Image (cartoon, rainbow, N blue to C red):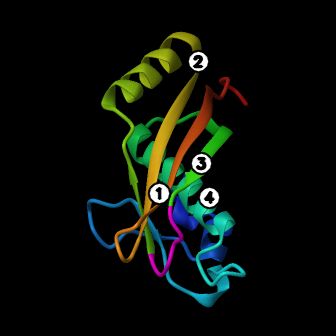
Amino acid sequence: MTSSVTELPFNRFLGLQLAATSDRVLQLPAGGQYLNHLGTVHASAQLALAEATSGEFLLRALGSTVGVVPVVRRLEAKFRKPANGILTSTVTTPPEALAALRADLAAKGRTLISVTVELHDESGAHTLSATVEWFITKIPPGT
């Protein structure tokens, strides 16, 4: 089992990192490879950071839960301001959502959870708000 989503091949390829401060989840370093035609951080790079952040949040929240498979079902995002430099992420999903996730997994063997992610650039500008909906199911015994 992966201890961080930063270990996944695509996220390693992108250079995603654990955030340098405890009040953030992940970060995307500054680099020319992340820029668009306007010289700001490309929308796809920001979406990748938001999706990975939601996955990291779930990985930490599920902790020792084994035998589950989470997959992204939907991602909705609003770009707020152009992004420059290092981007960092936060999650604002309420604890009640995690309690409902655990209860549904125990009762039904599957669940949905929406994880809200916010991205900020190194100047502090709020660049993106996203909600990532995950479908999580238990793996049937013996598979």
Q: Give the numbered dot on residue 77.
A: 3
First of labels 1, 4 by sequence position: 1
What kind of secondary structure does the magenta stretch mostly adopt? loop
First of labels 4, 3 by sequence position: 4
Distance (Cα) linking label 1 and label 4: 21 Å
Task: Say above or below: 21 vs 29.
Answer: above
First of labels 3, 2 by sequence position: 3
User: Which is in the foreground here, disc 2 or disc 4?
Assistant: 4
Range of residues picked out in magenta: 81-86
Q: Which residue is mark 2?
A: 109
Q: Which residue is mark 1?
A: 3
| Image location of residue 50, percent across then percent down | 54, 55
User: Which is in the foreground here, disc 3 or disc 1?
Assistant: 3
Q: Report the side of 43 relative to 101 (left or right).
A: right
Which residue is located at x 36 percent, y 43 percent? 92
Which residue is located at x 47 percent, y 81 percent? 85
- Under circle 2, the secondary element is loop
Which amino acid type is shown beneath numbered disc 1? Ser
